[in-house]
Image (cartoon, helix red, strand yellow):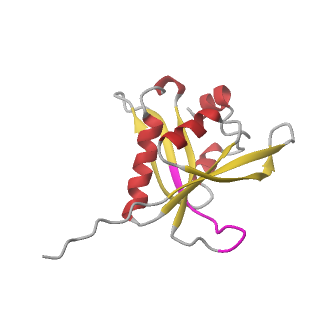
Amino acid sequence: MLAEVHRLDGYPMNWPVDPHRWLCDPRPARAWVAVDADRTIVGHIAVHRAAAPAEGQFARPTAEVARLFVSPAARGMALGGALLARARRWANERATDLVLEVAVGDTAAVALYERTGWRCTGTRTAPWTAPDGGSVSLRHFTVRSDPPPRLAEQ
């Protein structure tokens, strides 16, 4: 499925030498898949431990949505949103914010993130290059964990 997504969408932008390792690296914390009625994997999301930003530490516990893709045959079924919602539930249970980066030109992904409550907090140039050797601009998105419900005193 990843090869098909790459062929049709260019994600990941640079095809990994070892796709299995790419799905698991660099700092896996949790991953989920969506399956169809035949138990075929049709979507994947991975949350990794977030590396500290260049200016220091995060103000709150933070994890990164490092992988998200849906089979082209399964698109239009809201699987991307469902996978993001599952990752958010996991993060909320841990009072952890989520971050992610997406190539500026990936308008479908940007629309999904904005539609599901993510906020763009800036752009930067990727530390890696596109297949043609050119630079890649990334948009940085974040979503804060929901605070745990307060218990009323009686």
**Left or right, 34 with reference to 28:** left
Q: 16 left or right of 146? A: right
Residue 104, image x and y in percent?
A: 70, 41
Residue at left offset 42%, top offset 66%: 95
Residue furthest to the left in view is 154
In the picture, the quarter occupied by the C terminus is bottom left
Q: Nearer the viewer, residue 145 or 9?
A: 145
Residue lying at 59% horizontally and 52% vertically, measured from the top left? 100
Q: Is residue 62 magenta?
A: no
Q: Indicate whether 61 appears above or below 11.
A: below
Q: Where on the picture, by quarter, is residue 7?
A: top right
User: Could you say which is closer to the camera, residue 24 or residue 129?
Assistant: 129
Residue depicted at 22% across the width and 71% down the height: 151
> Residue 76, how many percent across, how many down?
46, 26
Outermost residue toward the top?
73
Magenta run includes residue 49: yes
**Prevailing secondary structure class for the magenta stretch in the rendered image:** loop
Q: In this image, 107 relative to 87: left or right?
A: right
**Residue drawn at 49 percent across, 42 percent down:** 44
- In which image quadrant can residue 33 be found? top left
Tally the numbered discs. 0
Q: Position of residue 109 (x, y in %)?
A: 59, 38
Q: Which residues are magenta?
A: 46-56
- Of the pair 140 and 79, the residue shown nearer to us: 140
